[in-house]
Image (cartoon, helix red, strand yellow):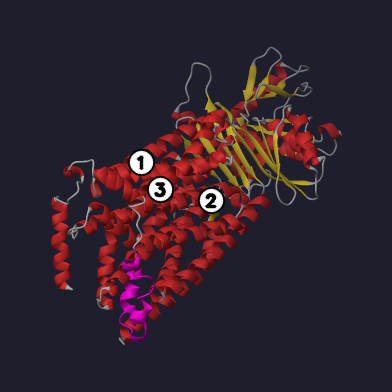
C-alpha cells in the first residue's frame, strides 16, 4: 500500500466534505429562484409606435429605464428586465406579492397632462419633480386619498401663470387621455405643487398612481403579448416536490452505482457530488435563475455525467477481462473512452446551444444549465474520477480485481440484432404510423403557448363542484371553456385569450364559490404562439444539420445519415404518443424534443464508435456480423446509462411538481425511443445504407487512411501492453 495515495484520497474526501458543508448556506441564500419556484409574474411587452413611425433604440432604452423605475417602486428583489429583438421587453418579477397589480402598473403608458379649457396642454408628466400619495383627514371620504405633485422650477412658474389665466375655470388632469380629475381653479398656486383628489377608493390606488408618475411616462405604448402569473403557494409546493424528487432519484442512483460498480461506482457518486457543487457555484457566479425546467436540466446533465463514468468503467472492465493489470486497465480504459465521451457529449451540447438561442424564458434556463452541466461533467469524469481511480489502484485493500471486475462480460452477449431487422422496423412503424394518422386527422393537442389564450389555475380551501366552476366560467367568458379538476380542490381553466380586466372579473366570480388561492394566471397572444412554433421548427432543423455535419466529419456520411434517421424515429415516437393520447403540447415540449435529439444520440454515437473501432480488426467478419458484435459489446453500457437517466426522470415524474409533468413524460418516452432506435434500428440502417454507398462513403471494407492509422495504433498499443 502506498501511503501517499491513501493520504491523497483521504485529503480529497475531507476537502470535498468541507466544501459541501461550507457551500450549503451561501448557495441556498444566493441562488435566484424563478417564478415557478417562488411565485411572481412574467410579462412580454411589445412596443407599439405611432402610425408611420418605428421603434428606435432610444425608445427601447427609455422603455427599459422607465420600467426599471416602476419595478423598483414595487420593491421586487432582483427583477429581470431585458430586451428581446428590436421591439420587445421581457419583465420578470419573482416573489412579487400582487402579480396582477404589478402587471397592470407595468403596462400603463402613464402620460400625464394638465389641459386648459381650450384644449391646450399646460404641463405634462415630464415637468414633475416628485409625486407622492397622502391622506387628507379633513376632506370628505371621496377626496381623502390624494396624490401630491411637485413641479420643477420652470414648470412651477408655468403652473402659477395657468392658475391666474384660468382662475374660476376647470383645468383637466388626464392620464393616458382619460380624465382622472377636473378641479376648478379657486386659488392662485405659486408653491409649485398640485393635488389630484377624488376617485381613489383606497390609499393604495393613490400610491400606485404616484409610483407611475415618479417612474415617468413610456415613450411609446406597450402591448402585452403574454403574461405568466404564478402564486407563491404553487411555487413553494413545486420547489419542495422537486427537491424531494431529486433526493429520491439520487439516492436510488447512488445505491445502484455502488452495488453494480463497487469501488468505481463509489468514486462515480463522489465525483457527482463534486460535479453538482461545481455546477451550482457556476450558476451562482453568473447569477443564473433556477426554475423547474432548470432543475430538470440539472438532473439530465447528471445523467450525462454518469454516462461518461459508465463509458469509462465499461472500458476498464473490458481491459480487466482480457487479463491486463488493474493500473494498465484504468489507463487504457480512459484513453479508449475519451473520444467516445467527447463525441457523445458534444452532440448533446450542440442541441443545448441551439435550444438556448431559439428558446425563451425558462427554456433558456434549461438549456444553459444543461450546457454548463455537460462541460462540468467532462471535467469531473475525465480528470477528477481518473485521479481517484489511479490512487485507489495504488491502495492495497482497494486494488483487488474483484472490486472492479463486476457485471457481465460483453462477450457473453450473443443477441441477434441484425437478423431480425424486419421485426424491429415493423415495431417502429406500429409506434409511429397511428400517431401520424391521428395527428393528420385531429391535429395535435396544442396548448395556449402555441394557439394563444388564457389559462387560470385556482385552488379552493374546501371542495367545490366541477359543474359549478364550469357554469361560473361559462357565464363570465361567454363561451364553453375547458375546465379540468385536479387534486386537492384545484381547477385548471383554459379559455380564449382574456384581457386583464376580464381575467380579474372571472377570478372575482370564482371567489364567490368559496375561498381560493390563485395558483397561476397565464395569457399568451397568438403572435407569440406562432413565433414559438416557427422557432421550434428552425431549432430542430438547425440542430439536425449541425449533428449531420459533425458526425460526417468525425465518422462518415453514412453514419451521419443513419444517426439523423434514428433521431427522426425518436421524435416521431414522442409526437405519435402525444397525439394518440391527446397530451397537451406546450413550450417545454419543444425543450424536451431538442433534449431528446441531443441526448438519445449518445447511445447511437457510442455504438458507432465501437463499430468504427472494430473495423480496424475486422478480419473475416461480414459487415452485418461486425455491427451485431459492436452492439452486443456496448449493450451493457447502453442499458445502464438509459436506466440511470430513467431513474432520475421517473423520480421527477412521480414526486415532482405538476407543471413539468408533460415535459418529463416527453423525456421518458424519448429515452425509451432512443434506446430502441440505437440498439435495434441504427446499426441495421447503417448496414443497409453502407451496402448501397460507394467505398468512398463507407463501403463494405475499411479502406480509408483513418482506418489504417487506427489499425497501426491498435497494434502498437497491443505490443506496449
Q: Position of residue 697 (x, y in %)?
A: 20, 43
Up/down of 290 relative to 409, above or below: above
Write the residue at 48% across / 19% down.
53
Q: Which residue is mark 2?
A: 664
Is residue 403 found inside the magenta-colored segment of the image? yes
Crowding around mark 1 (Cα neighbors within 10 Å: few <14, some 14 to 19, many 20+) is many
Q: Are marks 2 and 3 in contact (CB under 8 Å)?
A: no
Quarter assignment of residue 241:
bottom right
Foreground: 683 or 512?
683
What range is drawn magenta here?
Answer: 385-413
Write the residue at 39% across / 71% down.
407
Which element carries disc 3, helix, strand or loop?
helix
Quarter assignment of residue 586:
top right
Foreground: 462 or 68?
462
Q: Which residue is mark 3?
A: 423
- Give the mark nearest the N terminus, 1 or 2: 1
Up/down of 693 relative to 303, above or below: above
The residues bearing labels 2 and 3 have C-alpha atoms spaced at a distance of 29 Å
Whether residue 565 is visible here, answered yes or no, is yes
Write the residue at 47% across / 58% down.
645
Q: Position of residue 71 (x, y in %)?
A: 60, 41
Foreground: 350 or 186?
350
- Give the mark nearest the N terminus, 2 or 3: 3
Q: Are marks 1 and 2 in contact (CB under 8 Å)?
A: no
Is residue 671 found inside the magenta-colored segment of the image? no
The residues bearing labels 1 and 2 have C-alpha atoms spaced at a distance of 22 Å
Write the residue at 45% across / 64% down.
277
Q: Which residue is mark 1?
A: 544
User: In the rendered view, does 181 fall on the left or right side of 688?
Assistant: right
**Front disc: 3 or 1:** 3
Crowding around mark 3 (Cα neighbors within 10 Å: few <14, some 14 to 19, many 20+) is few
User: In the rendered view, does 239 fall on the left or right side of 59?
Assistant: right
Amino acid at each position: 500500500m502506498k501511503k501517499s495515495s491513501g493520504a491523497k484520497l483521504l485529503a480529497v474526501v475531507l476537502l470535498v466534505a468541507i466544501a459541501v458543508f461550507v457551500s450549503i448556506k451561501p448557495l441556498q441564500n444566493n441562488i435566484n429562484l424563478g417564478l415557478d419556484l417562488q411565485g411572481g409574474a412574467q410579462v412580454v411587452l411589445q412596443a407599439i409606435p405611432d402610425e408611420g413611425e418605428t421603434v428606435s433604440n432610444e425608445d427601447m432604452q427609455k422603455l427599459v429605464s422607465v420600467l426599471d423605475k416602476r419595478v423598483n417602486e414595487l420593491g421586487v428583489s432582483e427583477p429581470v428586465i431585458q430586451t428581446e429583438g428590436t421591439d420587445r421587453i421581457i419583465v420578470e418579477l419573482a416573489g412579487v406579492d400582487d402579480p396582477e397589480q404589478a402587471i397592470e402598473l407595468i403596462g400603463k403608458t402613464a402620460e400625464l397632462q394638465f389641459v386648459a379649457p381650450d384644449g391646450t396642454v399646460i404641463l405634462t408628466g415630464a415637468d414633475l419633480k416628485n409625486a407622492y400619495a397622502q391622506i387628507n383627514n379633513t376632506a370628505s371620504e371621496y377626496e381623502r386619498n390624494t396624490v401630491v405633485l411637485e413641479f420643477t422650477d420652470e414648470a412651477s412658474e408655468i403652473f402659477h401663470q395657468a392658475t391666474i389665466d384660468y382662475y374660476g375655470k376647470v383645468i383637466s388632469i388626464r392620464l393616458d387621455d382619460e380624465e382622472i380629475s377636473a378641479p376648478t381653479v379657486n386659488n392662485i398656486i405659486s408653491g409649485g405643487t398640485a393635488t389630484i383628489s377624488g376617485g381613489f377608493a383606497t390609499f393604495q390606488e393613490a400610491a400606485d398612481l404616484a409610483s407611475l408618475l415618479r417612474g415617468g411616462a413610456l415613450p411609446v405604448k406597450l402591448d402585452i403579448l403574454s403574461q405568466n402569473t404564478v402564486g407563491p403557494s404553487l411555487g413553494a409546493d413545486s420547489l419542495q416536490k422537486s427537491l424531494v424528487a431529486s433526493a429520491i432519484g439520487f439516492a436510488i442512483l447512488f445505491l445502484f452505482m455502488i452495488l453494480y460498480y463497487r469501488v468505481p461506482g463509489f468514486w462515480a457518486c463522489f465525483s457527482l457530488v463534486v460535479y453538482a457543487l461545481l455546477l451550482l457555484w457556476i450558476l451562482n457566479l453568473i447569477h443564473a435563475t433556477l426554475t423547474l425546467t432548470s432543475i430538470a436540466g440539472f438532473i439530465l446533465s447528471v445523467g450525462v455525467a454518469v454516462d461518461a463514468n459508465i463509458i469509462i468503467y465499461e472500458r476498464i472492465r473490458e481491459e480487466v477481462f482480457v487479463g491486463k493489470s488493474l493500473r494498465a486497465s484504468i489507463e487504457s480504459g480512459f484513453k479508449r473512452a475519451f473520444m467516445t465521451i467527447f463525441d457523445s457529449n458534444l452532440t448533446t451540447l450542440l442541441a443545448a446551444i441551439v435550444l438556448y438561442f431559439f428558446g425563451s424564458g425558462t427554456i433558456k434556463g434549461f438549456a444553459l444549465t444543461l450546457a454548463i452541466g455537460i462541460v462540468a461533467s467532462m471535467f469531473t469524469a475525465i480528470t477528477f474520477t481518473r485521479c481517484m481511480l489511479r490512487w485507489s489502484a495504488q491502495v492495497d485493500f482497494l486494488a483487488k480485481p474483484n472490486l472492479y471486475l463486476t457485471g457481465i462480460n460483453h462477450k457473453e452477449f450473443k443477441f441477434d440484432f441484425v437478423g431480425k431487422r424486419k421485426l424491429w422496423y415493423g415495431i417502429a412503424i406500429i409506434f409511429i404510423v397511428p400517431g401520424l394518422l391521428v395527428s393528420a386527422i385531429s391535429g395535435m393537442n396544442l396548448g395556449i403557448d402555441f394557439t394563444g389564450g388564457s389559462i387560470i389555475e385556482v385552488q379552493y380551501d374546501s371542495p367545490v363542484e366541477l359543474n359549478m366552476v364550469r357554469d361560473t366560467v361559462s357565464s363570465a367568458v361567454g363561451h364553453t371553456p375547458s375546465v379540468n379538476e385536479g387534486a386537492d380542490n384545484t381547477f385548471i381553466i383554459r379559455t380564449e385569450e382574456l384581457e386583464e380586466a376580464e381575467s380579474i372579473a372571472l377570478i372575482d366570480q370564482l371567489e364567490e364559490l368559496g375561498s381560493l388561492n390563485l395558483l397561476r394566471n397565464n395569457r399568451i397572444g397568438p403572435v407569440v404562439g406562432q413565433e414559438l412554433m416557427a422557432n421550434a421548427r428552425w431549432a430542430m432543423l438547425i440542430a439536425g444539420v449541425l449533428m449531420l455535419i459533425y458526425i460526417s466529419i468525425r465518422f462518415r456520411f453514412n453514419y451521419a445519415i443513419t444517426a439523423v434517421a434514428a433521431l427522426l424515429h425518436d421524435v416521431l415516437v414522442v409526437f405519435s404518443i402525444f397525439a394518440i393520447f391527446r397530451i397537451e403540447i406546450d413550450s417545454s415540449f419543444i425543450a424536451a424534443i431538442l433534449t431528446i435529439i441531443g441526448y438519445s444520440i449518445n447511445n447511437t454515437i457510442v455504438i458507432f464508435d465501437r463499430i468504427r473501432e472494430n473495423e480496424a480488426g475486422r478480419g473475416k467478419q461480414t459487415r452485418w456480423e461486425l455491427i451485431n458484435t459492436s452492439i452486443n459489446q456496448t449493450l451493457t453500457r447502453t442499458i445502464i446509462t438509459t436506466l440511470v437517466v430513467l431513474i432520475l426522470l421517473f423520480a421527477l415524474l412521480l414526486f415532482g411538481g405538476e407543471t413539468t409533468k408533460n415535459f418529463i413524460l416527453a423525456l421518458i418516452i424519448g429515452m425509451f425511443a432512443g434506446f430502441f432506435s440505437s440498439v435495434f434500428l441504427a446499426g441495421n440502417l447503417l448496414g443497409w445504407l453502407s451496402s448501397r454507398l460507394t467505398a468512398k462513403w463507407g463501403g463494405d471494407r475499411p479502406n480509408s487512411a483513418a482506418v489504417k492509422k487506427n489499425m497501426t495504433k491498435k497494434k502498437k498499443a497491443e505490443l506496449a501492453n
